Amino acid sequence: MKTMLAARYLAPHRLEAMEIPIPAIGDEEALLEVEACGFCGSDISIVAGTHPRARAPLTLGHELCGRIVEISASRSKVASGDRVAVYPLICCGQCHACTHGNAHVCRNLRLFGFDADGGMAQYVKLPVSSLIKLPEAMPERIGALIEPLAVAVHGVARASLDQVELAVVLGAGPIGLMTALVAQARGVGQVVVSDILASRMELAASLGLRVAAAGEELHNAVMELSNQNGADLLFECAGAPSTAQSMTALVRSRGAIINLGVFKKPVEVDMQSVNFKEIQLLGSRVYERADFAAGIELAKQLPLHRIVTHAFPLQQVSHAFEAFRLGQVCKALIVPAMSV
């Protein structure tokens, strides 16, 4: 049996590149040769052993692109040789959300890379229905960003932008940066991005975004830009207790807050301000298929390549993950074909 190299979560705090069999495909499945796969913040909880569903042994990775090398499908929009991104959601098809057109918030939602082997490997087996064709000319490092870009596209689409002149993005990680770029592309005139890490603030500024350090500097900047009213719209992309506590003070009366950040446990929110200012507070979870199509089009005009700050060969996955966990990189990609 032929083998491949894969990034395997083996036990809490154990992530190793190891040889495993290349999976055999069944009906309506395809085998992809992976071109690039990114780390996500959720991977930190998986490797720490604290994710509520992920179980070892498991191949990580749900942010990926690759090329189809084998396919078994009666009817499909993709074919052998196509370059594809991956829609990694696994939905039950039976709950209220699934039967009412909202399968992305399935009551029993699962994902490849969390609940089944993902794509941080030389090859990955996936349902043909999970594959979305990419332009042949799209660089691999951009193709691997389409999944997180779809998160940003979906989050921005949750808000009405008709009367939005000023938006704030809390968190300048990959999702925050992409959310700011998508908001600008959708016509928001002023976007202020904030973070606690100077390196991420510098990266945001290099993308042409206005930045302000979290805390008093951010508050003063928002009030100055809004005639002391507050921002029209705020995107919470950090998933941190401090941002949950501060976000309502940064938004004007009848403004809106969109929560994209994944909080690991319940946090304190100033619900009195939500009440008194009639703030809209909306959740945003992952994406719908249409967000991938929109992301593929937007990727052609956004400076996404600058968000990928580091790329590593698969053999160095443990080192790459540790650098990502410690915040030493913004977006880190594993590129299986990359030499050591």
Image: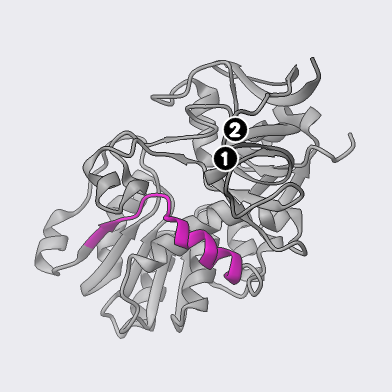
> Looking at the image, which residue is at 54% across and 70% down?
181
Q: Which stretch did the figure color magenta?
A: 281-298
Say what secondary structure mark 1 lies in.
loop
- Side of 6 where 222 appears, left or right: left
Give the image location of residue 59, x and y in percent: 62, 26
Establish if 330 lies above or below 281: above
Quadrant of the rendered structure where residue 1 is? top right
> Looking at the image, which residue is at 50% across and 58% down?
150
Please say whether residue 285 is one of the residues in the magenta stretch.
yes
Please say whether residue 163 is one of the residues in the magenta stretch.
no
Quarter of the image with the C terminus in it: top right
> Looking at the image, which residue is at 72% across and 30% down?
317
Give the image location of residue 31, x and y in percent: 69, 35
Going by the numbered disc 2, the residue's amino acid type is Gly
Q: How many marks?
A: 2
> Crowding near pointer 2: few (<14 within 10 Å), some, many (20+)?
many
Q: Residue tagged by mark 1?
A: 62
Going by the numbered disc 1, the residue's amino acid type is His
- Nearer to me, 185 or 97: 97
> Looking at the image, which residue is at 24% across and 52% down?
100
Q: Residue tagged by mark 2?
A: 118
Tags 1 and 2 in contact by the CB under 8 Å rule? yes
Establish if 11 lies above or below 105: above
Give the image location of residue 139, x and y in percent: 76, 59
The label shown at residue 72 is none
Q: Earlier in the sequence, mark 1 or mark 2?
A: 1
